[in-house]
Image: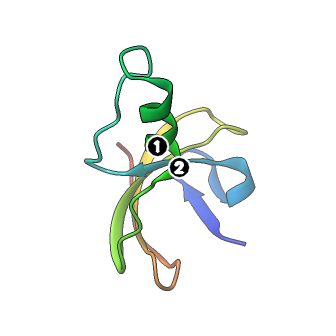
């Protein structure tokens, strides 16, 4: 299991978090796109290899968003930040 260091609460298991996708990915407004476009956005997540800056939401904790750098090959968290 992936351990994520929340900058506000400390280290927790990934089950406490919701993945928000890579930083810079365009998130369509669900009220302005068709159901099929929204489903495609939710299910066709980019999966680059190597270090990726990602957004995570601490849904079962402090309820705050933050950004981390994670290596998608090793799952090593390289650099958390308080964004």
Residue 29, above or below 46? above
Q: Position of residue 80 (x, y in %)?
A: 41, 60
Residue occupied by mark 1: 40
Q: Quadrant of the N terminus?
A: bottom right
What's the mark number on residue 43?
2
Q: Secondary structure at mark 1?
A: helix
Q: Residues within 10 Å of mark 1 (few under 14, many from 20)?
A: few
Q: CA distance from mark 2 to mark 1?
A: 5 Å
Can residue 46 be seen in the rendering of this structure?
A: yes
Can residue 13 be seen in the rendering of this structure?
A: no
Question: Cβ–Cβ below 8 Å for labels 2 and 1?
Answer: yes
The image quadrant of residue 58 is: top right
Residue 50, above or below 54? below
Q: Position of residue 10 (x, y in %)?
A: 62, 55
Q: Please identify the residue farthest to the bottom as the structure is shown.
A: 74
The image quadrant of residue 52 is: bottom left
């Amino acid at each position: 299991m992936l351990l994520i260091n929340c900058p506000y609460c400390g280290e927790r298991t990934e089950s406490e978090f919701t993945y928000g996708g890579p930083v810079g990915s365009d998130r369509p407004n669900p009220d302005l796109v068709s159901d099929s476009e929204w489903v495609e956005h939710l299910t066709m997540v980019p999966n680059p290899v190597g270090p990726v800056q990602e957004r995570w939401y601490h849904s079962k904790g402090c309820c705050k968003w933050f950004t981390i750098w994670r290596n998608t090959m090793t799952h090593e968290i390289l650099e958390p930040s308080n964004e």
